[in-house]
Image (cartoon, rainbow, N blue to C red):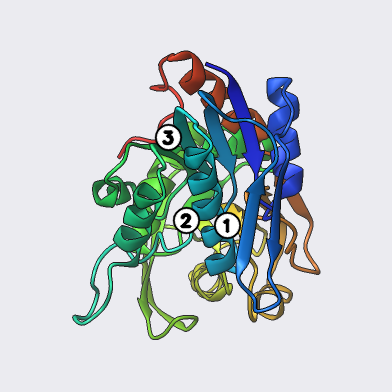
Amino acid sequence: MQLVLMAGPANPALAKGIAQALDARLADCEVSRFPDGEIHVEVRETVRDADVYLLQPTTPPIEAHLLQVLLLADACRRGGATRVTAVIPYFGYARQDRRASGREAVGARVIAEMLQGAGIDRVVAVDLHTTALEGVFPVPLEHLTAMPALAAALQSAYRERGVVVAPDAGATKLAERWARLLDLPVAVVHKTRLGGDVVQTRGLAGEVRSRRPLIVDDMISTGGTMAGAIAAVLEAGAIPDVVVAVSHGLFVGPAAERLAPLPITRLFVTDTVAGGDPPGHAVHVVSVAPLLADAIGRLHHGRSMSDLILHA
């Protein structure tokens, strides 16, 4: 079965990196809009009997990038593809995995079912907001982690007397994984979310006094959680020499304004999201192209993925 790589327009640099790592090329397709705003896609070469991998993070504008994936998958199915895998490095709606206050949609489940409905057989994602998200997918989900790649890049920047900090309770397991890898203690910031981009910190569990904090999370969106966590550890006596490591750097809304005045020495992100680096900080971008290329190669040839998968 022929391997076919196809990319939407959300992150062309990452798609090119994946293709180079696989010594393959990107199949020819077109994504455009009709005058009334409708998205139109066309696959311009044969995919009959092929093993197709659609490369597209669902970054802002999320709805457009998601619909592009759905339409490309449908086009590949109608073109005779044997198998279609969606490689979605950043999966939008991952935080909508449950009803927090009652009459809400479980957005992650809705999107997962849409992917299946478009003919997608499998999804590959990187560092989802929660490992429990696998439970809402009706198709197999390969949940990869960029933590080893981030940790390897961070080794030269991080110093003694460190402490790994989870910016909220949801990041506790992630912080514990980092702590085991780096042999450091853990602290957890307790927060309450007051709105989509407003949070309030309510204390800190763990000792950070006279230590250099490494704050880890799956993403930075508006920067509210990160700013609150940094304020909390500094108030508790941490050294104002903060290293931040996150998988997905969205940096939307007031993120740049919030992060600019903070004592962040180094900020590590991956390239799951194109562009969006906040001004005023030394951002180190770690590519997940080798990780995703490795996963695609293993899936195509039917090899084990166990050492790449993020387990709970």
Q: Which is in the foreground here, disc 1 or disc 2?
A: 1
Looking at the image, residue 118 sits to the left or right of residue 68; the answer is left
Q: Amino acid at mark 2?
A: Val
Q: Pick out the residue farthest to the left.
A: 102
Q: Is residue 206 visible?
A: no
Q: Is residue 293 visible?
A: yes
Tag 3 near tag 1, CB within 8 Å: no
Of callouts 1 and 2, the N-terminal one: 1
Q: Secondary structure at mark 2?
A: strand
The residue tagged 3 is: 180
x and y percentages locating residue 94 in the rendered image = 40, 59
Q: Amino acid at mark 1?
A: Gln
Give how far apart the Cα atoms at labels 1 and 2 are: 37 Å
The front one of 207 and 257 is 257
Describe residue 66's horizontal placement relative to residue 114 as left or right: right
Quarter holding residue 251: bottom right
Between label 3 and label 1, give the one nearer the viewer: 1
> Could you say which is closer to the camera, residue 195 or residue 26?
26
SS label for mark 1: helix
Quarter of the figure that contains the C terminus: top left
Q: Earlier in the sequence, mark 3 or mark 1?
A: 1
- Badge 1 vs badge 2, beta-carbon distance below 8 Å: no
The residue identified by callout 1 is 68
Q: Amino acid at mark 3?
A: Arg
Image mark for residue 165 = 2
Q: What residue lies at 41% left-to-right and 85% top-to-bottom? A: 195
Which residue is found at the position 50% from the left and 31% from the top?
81
